[in-house]
Structure formats: structure tokens, C-alpha cells
Image (cartoon, rainbow, N blue to C red):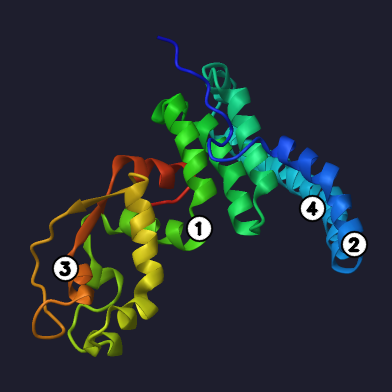
């Protein structure tokens, strides 16, 4: 059965529709709240006129640089494109994602991602390529950095390794009786781990190396420290697709 073509983003309306809706209603805001509303309208107008078009130009300039580099390495790069039935759709998705992205660093990833799709089309399926674009859209720079740490480690990593608390007594948070103490210090890591697991980029596993508790009796902090995860094949495909060299 032929698979259905997925929308650009299943969680929100197409960006052009959202843009038209904003343009059609934002002037009402200036009428209802002349002061701050007018300032919002002006900010949107400047943003719409300059920022979005600039992002698209940046994407294609960066993509051209990537493709020139790939063309020097692959004599048959043109045949790669011809073998990809989704090459035009992927370009549309990557341009739309880059246009929405406000982070300069994240925006550069989409041009790299598209060029890597062309470089090695056999390494991912059409569905996987769409998933990879969605992953990049939703993950933050710290999330991707943490995933890269797993990719370079080449094995399971435990919570105490990730938080730098392998040796007991290193953190003040470990001596607190309330969960909020260690969550204040390591909450962002816990959040990133949860997102990477939910997206199928990390998977629960067991690490049998020696483990040291910080305090007598179980604690939420120690329960996180003794858990272990390993990067999944999809996680490695994501890192490969954004040009992360995992041999270092």
C-alpha cells in the first residue's frame, strides 16, 4: 500500500497559513491596544520583511557550499539526486524548518542535513529522513550535544557519568533530602534524556560497572545516577546526517 504523504509538521498548521492569519489579524491588535499593539505590529512587519527572507537566503548559500564540497568528493553525486524520489519534498521541508528556526546554530544544521541526505541516500529511508527533520526541529542544542556525547562514547552511559557524579560526595545536591535540590542542578540533563528516549534516539540498558551511592538508602538522585542508556541506530543516523564525526 502506498504510504500517505505526511504534512510538514503534524503538530501545527502549515507556516504559510499561520503567516497569513497573523497578517490578517495583527492590525486589529494595534487598534485595540494602540501603544504596545502598534509596537508589536511594527516588530512583526520588520521580522516578516527581513528576517524570514534572510534565513532562506542563508540556507541556500550554506547548501551551495556543502554541495560544492560534496561534488568534489563524489563524481556521481548527480545520480544520487536522481535516485531520491523525495528530493524535492525534503528541500521544501528543510527550507520551511530553516525559515521558522530562530537559532543561528540550529538553522545551519538544516542545510547540512539536506546535503547529507543527497550524499548518502541509501543510509536512510524516506520515512526516516522526514523523522530526522522533525527531530532536529524539536530538539535543542543541549539535547543534540548530549546525544553526541553518547555517540562518541561507543557504549552505555549511566546517569552518574552524564552528571559528573561518579565519585560520591562531589555534589552538594547529593546530600539534600528533597528531589528539588538535585533537579535544580541536573534538571536540564534529566529533561534532555527524557526527550531523547521519547524520540527513540536513546534506549534503556544496564551497566554493570561499580556504582557508589551518595547517601544511605535510595534517593531520587541515586536512582537517576544508576540508570543507563545507549544510543539507538536512529540516534546514530541523526548524528551522521548532521555531519558529526564519531571517530574522534
Asked whether the beta carbons under mark 1 and mark 4 sit within 8 Å of each other, the answer is: no
Tell whether 218 sits left or right of 153.
Answer: left
Tell whether 246 sits left or right of 28.
Answer: left
In front: 36, or 33?
A: 33
- CA distance for labels 3 and 2: 54 Å
Query: Along the polypeptide, which appears first: circle 3 or circle 1?
Result: 1
- CA distance for labels 1 and 4: 21 Å
Disc 1 crowd rating (10 Å Cα; few below 14, some 14-19, many 20+) is some
Which residue is pictured at 59% across the width and 44% down the height? 110
Asked whether the beta carbons under mark 3 and mark 2 sit within 8 Å of each other, the answer is: no
Task: Give the position of the C terminus as an image quadrant.
Answer: bottom left
Task: Give the position of the N terminus as an image quadrant.
Answer: top left
Disc number for residue 226: 3
Q: Which element type, helix, strand or loop, lies under badge 4?
A: helix
Residue that mark 4 sits on: 51
Q: Is residue 65 above or below residue 162?
A: above
Q: Which element type, helix, strand or loop, lies under badge 1?
A: loop
Q: How many marks?
A: 4
Query: Along the polypeptide, which appears first: circle 2 or circle 1?
Result: 2
Give the foreground label among 2 and 4: 2
Query: Along the polypeptide, which appears first: circle 2 or circle 4?
Result: 2
Q: Which element type, helix, strand or loop, lies under badge 3?
A: helix
Residue that mark 2 sits on: 38
Q: Which element type, helix, strand or loop, lies under badge 2?
A: helix
Quadrant for residue 193, please give it: bottom left
Residue that mark 1 sits on: 140
Amino acid at each position: 500500500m502506498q504510504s500517505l504523504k505526511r504534512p510538514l509538521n503534524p503538530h501545527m498548521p502549515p507556516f504559510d497559513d499561520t503567516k497569513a492569519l497573523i497578517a490578517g489579524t495583527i492590525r486589529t491588535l494595534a487598534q485595540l491596544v494602540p501603544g504596545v499593539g502598534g509596537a508589536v505590529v511594527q516588530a512583526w512587519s520588520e521580522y516578516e520583511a527581513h528576517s524570514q527572507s534572510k534565513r532562506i537566503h542563508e540556507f541556500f548559500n550554506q547548501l551551495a557550499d556543502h554541495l560544492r564540497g560534496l561534488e568534489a568528493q563524489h563524481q556521481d553525486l548527480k545520480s544520487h539526486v536522481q535516485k531520491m524520489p523525495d528530493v524535492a519534498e525534503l528541500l521544501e521541508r528543510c527550507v520551511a524548518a530553516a525559515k521558522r528556526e530562530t537559532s543561528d546554530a540550529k538553522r545551519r544544521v538544516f542545510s547540512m542535513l539536506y546535503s547529507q541526505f543527497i550524499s548518502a541516500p541509501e543510509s536512510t529511508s524516506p520515512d526516516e529522513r522526514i523523522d530526522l527533520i522533525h527531530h532536529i526541529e524539536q530538539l535543542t542544542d543541549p539535547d543534540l550535544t548530549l546525544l553526541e556525547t553518547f555517540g562518541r562514547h561507543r557504549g552505555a552511559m549511566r546517569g552518574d557519568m552524564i552528571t559528573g557524579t561518579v565519585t560520591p560526595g562531589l555534589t552538594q545536591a547529593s546530600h539534600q533530602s528533597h528531589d528539588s535540590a538535585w533537579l535544580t542542578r541536573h534538571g536540564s540533563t534529566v529533561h534532555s534524556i527524557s526527550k531523547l528516549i521519547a524520540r527513540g534516539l536513546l534506549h534503556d540498558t544496564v551497566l554493570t560497572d561499580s556504582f557508589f551511592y551518595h547517601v544511605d538508602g535510595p534517593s531520587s538522585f541515586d536512582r537517576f545516577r544508576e540508570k543507563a542508556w545507549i544510543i539507538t541506530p536512529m540516534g546514530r543516523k541523526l548524528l551522521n546526517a548532521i555531519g558529526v564525526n564519531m571517530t574522534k
